[in-house]
Amino acid sequence: MRWHWYDILQVLGSIAGITGVSLLGHVSERTRGIALILIIIGVFAAVIASVIARVQPMTKVGRDAMVDTGRSVIRSAKAQVIMFGGDMSWAADYQEAIRYAAERGKSVVVIFPRQPRSSRTLGS
């Protein structure tokens, strides 16, 4: 994972906030102000970093990377795999991973919509 400056800001803000909260109950009245300042800085830093992270452009991921990730998730399932099928054009990409999960006793369920009445053939 690549760290951005706003990730580091969020971590530092969180540390400042946690430190401020932990100090709040154990400090004198004189240093309580420092603890409150740490909490305020922590909250503002975390909020600012979160807002900045949301407006960053999304990283493009290729189809191969998505398929590899999907296969890995299917293979590592603990008990059940539930997939939403759509047009089932993806099935060949995940066939080996689905077979692997099923052979190890995992339940595999594929949910896909039925054809709408208008697209059915005559006589069905």
Image: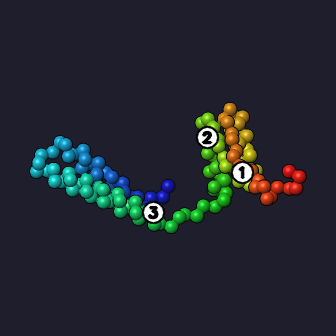
Dot 2: element: loop
Do the CB atoms of the residues marked 3 and 2 lie less than 8 Å apart? no
Q: Is residue 93 visible?
A: no
x%, y% of residue 5? 40, 62
Dot 1: element: loop
Q: Residue furthest right?
A: 123
x%, y% of residue 101? 68, 38
Which residue corresponds to mark 1?
Answer: 113
The crowd level at tag 1 (other Cα within 10 Å; few <14, some 14-19, many 20+) is: few
Which residue corresponds to mark 2?
Answer: 76
Tell me which numbered mark, 3 or 2, is placed earlier along the sequence: 3
Corner quadrant of residue 55:
bottom left
Q: Which mark is residue 54?
A: 3
Task: Tell me the colour scheme of the image.
Answer: rainbow
x%, y% of residue 102? 71, 36
**Residue occupying image coordinates x 71% and y 53%:** 86
Tell me which numbered mark, 2 or 1, is placed earlier along the sequence: 2
Hey, what amino acid is under mark 3? Arg
Tell me which numbered mark, 1 or 3, is placed earlier along the sequence: 3
Disc 2 from disc 1: Cα separation: 26 Å
Disc 3 from disc 2: Cα separation: 29 Å
Nearer the observer: mark 1 or 3; the answer is 1
x%, y% of residue 97? 70, 44
Horizontally, residue 96 falls left or right of residue 8, namely right
Horizontally, residue 28 falls left or right of residue 38, namely left
**Residue occupying image coordinates x 36% and y 54%:** 11
Dot 3: element: helix
Hey, what amino acid is under mark 2? Ser
